[in-house]
Image (spheres, helix red, strand yellow):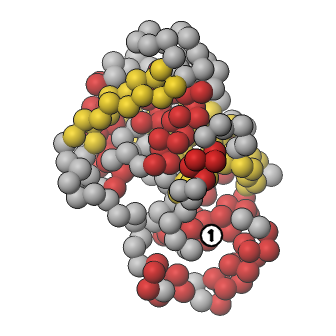
Amino acid sequence: MSASTIALEEKLDALDPLRHLRNSDELDLVPLQPPSVLNQTLDLAFPAADSHLAESVNTVLIRLFVDASPGCGGIAWPAGEVLSSYVARRPSLEGKSVLELGSGTGLVGLVAAKLGANVCITDQKPLLQIMARNVELNDLENRVKVLELNWGEPLPEDIPRLDLVLAADCVYFEPAFPLLVHTLHELASRDDSEILFCYKKRRKADRRFFALLKKKLNWEEVNDDPNISSYSKEAISLLRIVRK
């Protein structure tokens, strides 16, 4: 997204802050979710760069319980699978400290844990039970901690110094945009950790998120992912967020 486009969006928002909500194609504040996804278990596999994995030489295997009952975070979304695939292809995360924002099912954080990281997967209270169940399903109780983290609120005190922050499919609810930006900025300022941010463009209102983000942080597109040509066709972007 160009700087000129963001600047124009900011000017239009200042004139009419509710303009996005009045457009007929902007009424869905959260992505549509399949109503039939209830109490299901998925088996997912991600090609890995490392060979230290116990269950398969070149594959990260995840068993994922999904259930849309608590909300859209309870199922697997495309950006989460894209980020999981990218993380799995990176070198070992052995001993690294990782946090996933808006974890939902915990998928991306579970992949990081399979690669040796010590992980905090975080989300709002209604999703904690699903995340805890997925930690247990993958025998990762010794590597993964489930924490409640509401964007915009102070970070939990028991979050350690972080090497990597992961976030996927977090841009969908416009009132939460400033809260998410606040938390991303707090994490970036706290530890100077790497932040990988994957999202699927769904609405024009998503530009407001990046207009807010631009005031606090910079970002660049991740260009070393061999799958980029495939998921970019689906309007999915993988970004690296950095401090100004």
Give the camera-side residue of 22 and 89: 89
**Residue 115 visible in rendering:** yes
Rendered location of residue 184, percent (x, y): 61, 50
In this view, 85 is above or below 30: above
Identify residue type, mark 1: Arg
Give the side of residue 142 with respect to residue 188, left or right. Answer: left
Q: Residue at x 58, y 56 (%)?
A: 233
Rendered location of residue 154, percent (x, y): 53, 48
Give the camera-side residue of 159 and 68: 68
Q: Quadrant of residue 192?
A: top right
Q: Residue at x 50, y 66 (%)?
A: 202
**Quadrant in which the N terminus is drawn:** bottom right
- Give the labeled residue for mark 1: 207
Rendered location of residue 29, percent (x, y): 41, 70
Label 1 CA crowd tier, 10 Å (few <14, some 14–19, many 20+): some
Count of all numbered marks drawn on residues in the image: 1
Q: Helix, strand or loop at disc 1? A: helix
Q: Quadrant of residue 55?
A: top left
In this view, 86 is above or below 153: above
Q: Residue at x 62, y 70 (%)?
A: 207
Give the side of residue 148 with respect to residue 37, left or right. Answer: right
Rendered location of residue 204, percent (x, y): 56, 74
**Residue 125 visible in rendering:** no
Give the side of residue 68 with respect to residue 45, left or right. Answer: left
Give the side of residue 82 with respect to residue 2, left or right. Answer: left
Give the camera-side residue of 47 and 199: 47
Q: Residue at x 35, y 64 (%)?
A: 32
